[in-house]
């Protein structure tokens, strides 16, 4: 399976058009958008149209710039292509996808306890999948992906604990603009800050 993961589009239709071209060229099976699709709700009109025209399935979660209402609106607008991963889950063959959106900071904030509960709720539905992919917006605490400024870690402790507990093959995130495109590892799990340019991932 081939996945195109991206995050932090912030309503940038050109970024989406470039991702759609990449999805077509790479012949990906699934597109994952790891939050911050909008700028506090603006920029969503027509944003996913290039993916819809490709007839590619898209999994989404909200970031701290998005609300759950924004995601509900997108699901109503694009019902044929969207999977919701915000405390939900789905399977494609032997691969299970689970996750949690929003972040531990910002206007659409979740507490670490809430993040933990939503990830655990989502995981239950795919716990028997042969391979597991976790999708979150905020990166795990104390990794290369959550560093801003002079080595200040701003990631989620709940996300880190979930990775260490559930040991997914991949964990896809975004949120920290300074670390777009970087990768790290926690145990067996490859952690990827997808960023708006996107990353092609093979499972």
Image: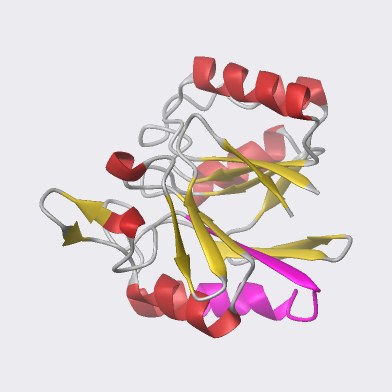
Residue 52, picture quadrant: top right
Can residue 46 be seen here? The reply is: no
Say whether residue 132 is magenta. Answer: yes
Say whether residue 101 is magenta. Answer: no
Please give the name of the residue rendered at 81% of the width and 62% of the height, measured from the top-left corner: 91
Please give the name of the residue rendered at 82% of the width and 38% of the height, measured from the top-left corner: 80
Q: Return the x and y of residue 127 as percentages of the image width and height.
A: 73, 80
* Residue 169 in the image: above or below residue 78: below
Can residue 104 be seen here? The reply is: yes
Please give the name of the residue rendered at 35% of the width and 54% of the height, measured from the top-left corner: 145
Q: Is residue 51 left or right of residue 73?
A: right
Q: Return the x and y of residue 17 as percentages of the image width and height.
A: 61, 17
Give the residue at the far right of this rendering: 93
* Residue 91 in the image: above or below residue 61: below
Q: Is residue 28 left or right of residue 154?
A: right
Using the image as rendered, state which of residue 71 and residue 192 is in the foreground: 192
Q: Is residue 26 left or right of residue 158?
A: right
Residue 168, picture quadrant: bottom right
Q: Is residue 96 left or right of residue 33?
A: right
On the rendered image, what quadrant is the C terminus found in? bottom right
* Residue 146 in the image: above or below residue 46: below
Stretch of the chain drawn in magenta: 117-136
């Amino acid at each position: 399976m081939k996945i195109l993961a991206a995050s932090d589009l912030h309503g940038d239709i050109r970024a989406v058009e470039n991702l759609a071209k990449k999805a077509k060229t790479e012949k990906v099976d699934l597109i994952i958008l790891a939050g911050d699709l909008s700028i506090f709700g603006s920029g969503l009109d027509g944003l996913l149209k290039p993916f819809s025209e490709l007839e590619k399935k898209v999994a989404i979660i909200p970031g701290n710039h998005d609300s759950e209402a924004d995601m509900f609106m997108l699901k109503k607008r694009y019902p044929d292509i969207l999977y919701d991963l915000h405390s939900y889950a789905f399977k494609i063959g032997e691969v299970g996808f689970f996750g949690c959106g929003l972040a531990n900071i910002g206007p659409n904030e979740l507490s670490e306890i809430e993040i933990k509960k939503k990830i655990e709720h989502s995981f239950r539905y795919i716990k028997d999948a042969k391979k597991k992919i976790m999708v979150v917006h905020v990166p795990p605490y104390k990794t290369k992906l959550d560093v801003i400024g002079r080595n200040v870690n701003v990631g989620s402790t709940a996300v880190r604990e979930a990775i260490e507990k559930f040991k997914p093959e991949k964990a896809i995130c975004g949120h920290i603009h300074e670390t777009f495109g970087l990768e790290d590892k926690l145990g067996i799990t490859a952690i990827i800050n997808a960023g708006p340019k996107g990353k092609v991932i093979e499972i």
